[in-house]
Each structure stands twice: as structure tokens, then as C-alpha cells.
Image (cartoon, rainbow, N blue to C red):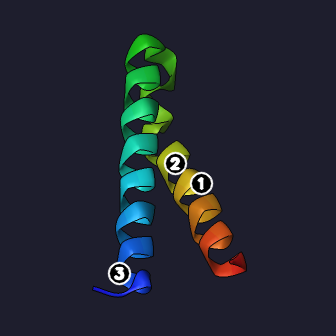
Amino acid sequence: MNMTDVKTIFIKLKITSSYVKELQSVEYIPHLGSSKNSIQFSDDEKLRRRFLAQ
């Protein structure tokens, strides 16, 4: 197991935890429920850009 594997696992964990937090916040704000997917997509874009910038 090299450092790249470790980094990938941490990135996956970060993405998962951010999705969980987001799902929790969406649950508490019903009017955001319809735009949940677009919020997740933009979050995913940010994570992807941050990853590419490293």
C-alpha cells in the first residue's frame, strides 16, 4: 500500500463525510430538498477541482 492509495482513501472519506453533512442539512431545510442533487454536483465539482489542483 503506497502513499497514493492512502491519499485516495482519505479523499473518499472526505467526500463521504461532506455528503453526510450535506444530506443532514438538506433534511432540516425542506425547501432545499428539490435542489439536493444540484448542490451535491457543485460540491463534487469543488472537490474535483481541489483534487486536480493538488
Spatial CA span between label 3 and label 1: 25 Å
Tag 3–tag 2 contact (CB < 8 Å): no
> Residue 12 at what x, y percent from top left?
37, 62
> Label for residue 38?
2
| Viewer-side residue, 40 vs 49 | 49
Amino acid at dot 3: Asp
Q: On the rendered structure, is 17 left or right of 46? A: left
> Label for residue 42?
1
From what the image shows, is residue 31 above or below residue 23? Answer: above
> Residue 38 at what x, y percent from top left?
52, 48
Q: Nearer the viewer, mark 1 or mark 2?
A: 1
Tag 1–tag 2 contact (CB < 8 Å): yes
Q: Earlier in the sequence, mark 3 or mark 1?
A: 3
> Residue 19 at what x, y percent from top left?
40, 43
Quadrant housing the N terminus: bottom left
Q: Nearer the viewer, mark 3 or mark 2?
A: 3
Q: Local crowd at mark 2 within 10 Å, few (<14), some, or many (≥20)?
A: few
Q: On the rendered structure, is 10 left or right of 31? A: left
Amino acid at dot 2: Ser
Q: Which residue is mark 3?
A: 5
Outermost right residue = 53
Which quadrant would residue 13 be assigned to in this image? bottom left
Outermost left residue = 1
Spatial CA span between label 3 and label 2: 29 Å
Q: Residue at x 46, y 33 (%)?
A: 22
Spatial CA span between label 1 and label 2: 6 Å
| Helix, strand or loop status at disc 3 | helix
Q: Local crowd at mark 1 within 10 Å, few (<14), some, or many (≥20)?
A: few
| Helix, strand or loop status at disc 1 | helix
